[in-house]
Image: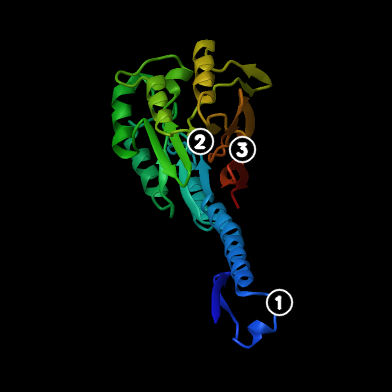
Amino acid sequence: MKFWFRWNNKKFYIELKEKSMFKTKIGIDKILIIVLFINILYIQLYGQESKTDDDHFYFVQISDTHIGKGTNLEITQRLVKQINELPMNIRFVIHTGDITQNGMSDTISVLNAIEALEKLAAPIYYIPGNHDIFQKNLEKEINIFQEYFGKLIFIRKFKEVSFIGLYSDPLAYSFSVEGYDVFNELENALKKTYGKPVVVFHHIPSVEFFYNNTMHDGWDNENRDRWEKTLNSYNVIAILAGHFHSDEQHWISEIPLYVSASVTNRFGRQPSFRIYEYKNGKLSYRTQYEK
């Protein structure tokens, strides 16, 4: 009589001969219990491992390429190559704004940016920054951005995590965009996450900015407070931003805010990007510099 079971993706069996059944104290019922126990143990161990594998992935953040100024295009091209050579499986790349230096109206810079960034092996998603959409050309540059780079707000779901990217400059600078209410759009997107973990991407952090040895104001208090309250009402596990051209970490109440340094070498900065790792419901990162 044979009893089959699986262990480490291999098939095994226990064979009991009729003669030996009378010489052993272990009866068939006990053998069945042992086999059942082994199968349960396998399911628990390897079923959990499969869930962990499904809950573990990498993505990259780049920010502030400012293509159209100095050697930023060449720097971006080199970092694209460096990202493509990473040994881990990068699921996607997020660009958190200031793709260009002189706005979407600078057609040559827009085309150069597209040509450089579309060479990424992983899919890329974009958020506009204050150097992409200038208020003096608001409608025109919004239209160009949406034509070539995507919507002002998007939601992508990967594994168990929802990623929301949005154009937050109207909150940072307190101006309005016809047909685009940031808080309403954000709230609607967050409701679609159904309590699952969420990562939010935007360009200008809501916190104060320290540069030239001086602290500078962030968003106005009303927008900042509402932003904080809205995000903390959902399962947002992290906020990712750019704009400051420096590595920083802050807290928006209970949510960590990770500010990425820039691709451009402006202000004497070393060009960089970030590799994020999502594992067991938590987000961590490594900053990588140009080789």
Amino acid at pointer 1:
Lys
Q: Earlier in the sequence, mark 1 or mark 2?
A: 1
Crowding at mark 2 (Cα within 10 Å: few <14, some 14-19, many 20+): some
Q: Closest to the observer: 36 or 130? A: 36
Q: In what quadrant of the picture does the N terminus appear?
A: bottom right
Q: Residue at x 53, y 31 (%)?
A: 236
Q: Which mark is residue 265?
A: none
The disc at residue 269 is 3
Does residue 152 sit above or below 13 in this rendering?
A: above
Query: Quick one: label 3 or label 1, which is nearer the N terminus?
Result: 1
Numbered tag placed on residue 25 in the rendering: 1
Q: Is residue 77 visible?
A: no
Mark 2: which secondary structure?
Answer: strand
Tell me the residue that label 2 is attached to.
Answer: 199
Three-letter residue code for mark 3: Arg
How much space separates mark 1 and mark 2, taking CA atoms? Answer: 58 Å
